[in-house]
Amino acid sequence: MPEVARNLQKYFSEERFFAFFGKMGVGKTTLIKEFCAALGVEDNVCSPTFAIVNEYCRPLESGQQEPVYHFDFYRLKSLAEAYDIGYEEYFYSGCYCFTEWTEKIEELLPERYVRVEIKEKEGMRTLRAEVSSL
């Protein structure tokens, strides 16, 4: 997974919004954790299942830090809950955003994002990533 995360970062170096799709247990959180590590995040990266969003700190070359946002929409009951947490401020911040269970808020996605689909079949995982535009 670390190599996959580094490759995603390399191939999509200009992108900041990554929407993850895949069934439970397929490795979305694990990949996001590795992606955060590749970005230099030293915080404990874990699924924000109950909090909906976790914020981590990414060190910059300037010595400053910028936030990295990690969403888990699994427990979201309605789009109103996404509005309640102020999703727009996060999604359009220009900072890295990683979303899990994105299908629950797909209509709220920004115009441009990296769609990362992970599938598992017979113990093998496949990943497909592409820039999507609405």
Image (spheres, rainbow, N blue to C red):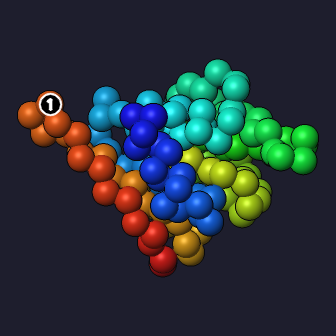
Say which residue label 1 marks: 123
Q: Amino acid at mark 1?
A: Gly
Tell me: residue 73, above or below residue 88.
above
- Coordinates of residue 33 in the picture (x, y in percent): 53, 32
Please tell me which residue lies in front, 127 or 88.
127
The residue at 81%/45% (across/down) is 60
- Coordinates of residue 23 in the picture (x, y in percent): 29, 40
- Coordinates of residue 54 in the picture (x, y in percent): 67, 34
**In this image, 63 relative to 89: left or right?**
right
**Residue placed furthest toward the bottom:** 134
Please tell me which residue lies in front, 50 or 123.
123
**Residue placed furthest toward the left:** 122
The residue at 79%/39% (across/down) is 59
- Coordinates of residue 99 in the picture (x, y in percent): 52, 47
**In this image, 103 relative to 98: left or right?**
left
Quarter holding residue 30: top left
Quarter holding residue 132: bottom left
**In this image, 99 relative to 27: left or right?**
right
SS at mark 1?
Answer: loop
**Residue placed furthest toward the right:** 63
Q: Is residue 10 visible to the viewer in this orientation of the structure?
A: yes
Q: Is residue 84 visible to the viewer in this orientation of the structure?
A: no
The image quadrant where one finds the N terminus is top left
The residue at 48%/77% (across/down) is 133
The residue at 64%/21% (across/down) is 44
| Neighbour tally class for label 1: few under 14, some 14-19, many 20 plus, Cα within 10 Å | few
